[in-house]
Image (cartoon, rainbow, N blue to C red):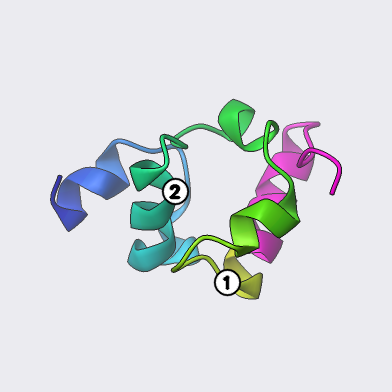
């Protein structure tokens, strides 16, 4: 999967960064619904996913009425 393909194969905004998008995609997480099965803490443990990405994804989840799983 190339960097360009990763962005087009996920629902996530490019503002989380290519590294975070790639890390999530490599773990099979490409949709907001899939994010709800993971805690923010477990996502932070993925190499390439940082606090800024978690904040942005959390905001995006909230706009959809969703949240991360409990930590």
Residue at 70% of width from left, 33% of height from top?
36
The residue drawn where x is 19% and y is 56% is: 3
The residue at 58%/72% (across/down) is 50
Image-based side of 10 in relation to 42, left or right: left
Residue farthest to the top, as pictured: 33
- Give coordinates of residue 44: x percent, y percent: 62, 63
Residue 54 in the image: x percent, y percent? 65, 61
Query: Is 66 situated above or below 7?
Result: above
Q: Residue at x 66, y 47 (%)?
A: 60
Quadrant of the image occupied by residue 14: bottom left
Q: Is residue 67 magenta?
A: yes
- Total numbered labels: 2
Dot 1, crowdedness within 10 Å: few (<14), some or many (≥20)? Answer: some
The answer to whether residue 45 is above or below residue 50 is above
Tell me if label 2 and label 1 are in contact, CB under 8 Å: no
Cα separation between marks 2 and 1: 11 Å
Q: Which residues are magenta?
A: 54-71
Q: Is residue 43 magenta?
A: no
**Helix, strand or loop for disc 2:** helix
Instruction: Name the residue that disc number 1 marks.
Output: 50
Identify the secondary structure beneath mark 1. loop
Q: Percent position (x, y) of residue 22?
A: 33, 54
Residue 7 vs residue 41, the one in the foreground = 41
60 to the left or right of 68: left
Report the residue marked by disc 2: 24
On-image quarter of the N terminus: top left
């Amino acid at each position: 999967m190339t960097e360009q393909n990763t962005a087009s194969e996920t629902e996530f905004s490019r503002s989380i960064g290519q590294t975070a998008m790639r890390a999530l995609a490599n773990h099979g997480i490409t949709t907001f619904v899939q994010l709800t099965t993971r805690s923010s803490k477990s996502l932070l443990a993925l190499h390439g996913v940082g606090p800024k990405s978690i904040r942005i994804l959390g905001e995006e989840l909230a706009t959809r009425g969703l949240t991360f799983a409990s930590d």
